[in-house]
Amino acid sequence: MPSLLHSNRTYVSIGGDYMNQTEVFIKAFYKSINLMIPSVISISNITDILNINLIHWSNTSAMTYYNKQYFMFINEFLTSQQQWQEFGHEMCHYFNDRINRKNVNSSFVDYCETKADYFAYHFCVPTFMLQKMKRIDVYDVMQLFNVEFDFALRRLEMYHNKILSKGVL
């Protein structure tokens, strides 16, 4: 998938709202596939649109490219919320990681995994969707975005910290 965003800025102003590169990328991605509200973002919708082969299995989740096709493996024993969160993590690898991990330093692999964890928060609970909501709490985020309590709580903390750092509240 080609990159949807090229920018050297840390934050980009979109309609008066400042978003970092990850947030802008995710908004552009969801807009490009016409999934703009929480009720339509799902593993099946995204894998169908992107032609990613989804395989449920008993091992840890992973993303791979083989024989000109993408395959995403999701652990079948996880809850639907955990699967969605894992999916968000693996989508970071889909968009960003084109490396053979056997050929790189383990600290770089750790960096890629940390980056994918961060990406998952924004992919599963997009900033541009949160910006449209008023007085949302952790239970609303859990229900609207199909994520677990701890994930929803951390995502709201990230969102509120961002707002506070911009002096909006």
Image (tube, rainbow, N blue to C red):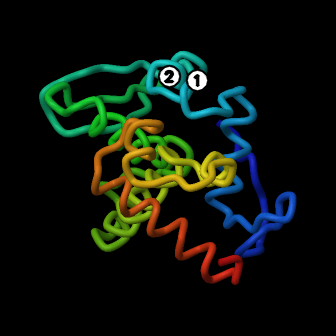
Q: Residue at x 65, y 29 (%)?
A: 35
Query: Which mark is on residue 47?
Result: 2
**25 or 157, nearer to the observer:** 157
Residue 127 % position (x, y) = 61, 54
Q: Residue at x 58, y 48 (%)?
A: 126
CA–CA distance in space, label 2 to label 1: 5 Å
CB atoms of marks 2 and 1 within 8 Å: yes
| Quarter of the figure with residue 106 | bottom left
Q: Is residue 76 left or right of residue 80?
A: left
The total number of labels drawn is 2
Bin the neighbour count of mark 1 within 10 Å (Cα to Cα): few under 14, some 14-19, many 20 and up. Answer: few
Q: Amino acid at mark 2?
A: Thr
Residue 91 % position (x, y) = 47, 41
Q: Is residue 92 left or right of residue 57?
A: right
Q: Secondary structure at mark 2?
A: helix
Q: Is residue 53 above or below residue 79?
A: above
Q: Is residue 63 left or right of residue 1?
A: left
Q: Which residue is mark 1?
A: 50
Bin the neighbour count of mark 2 within 10 Å (Cα to Cα): few under 14, some 14-19, many 20 and up. Answer: some
**134 or 100, nearer to the observer:** 134
Q: Secondary structure at mark 1?
A: helix
Residue 60 % position (x, y) = 19, 39
Q: Residue at x 59, y 74 (%)?
A: 162
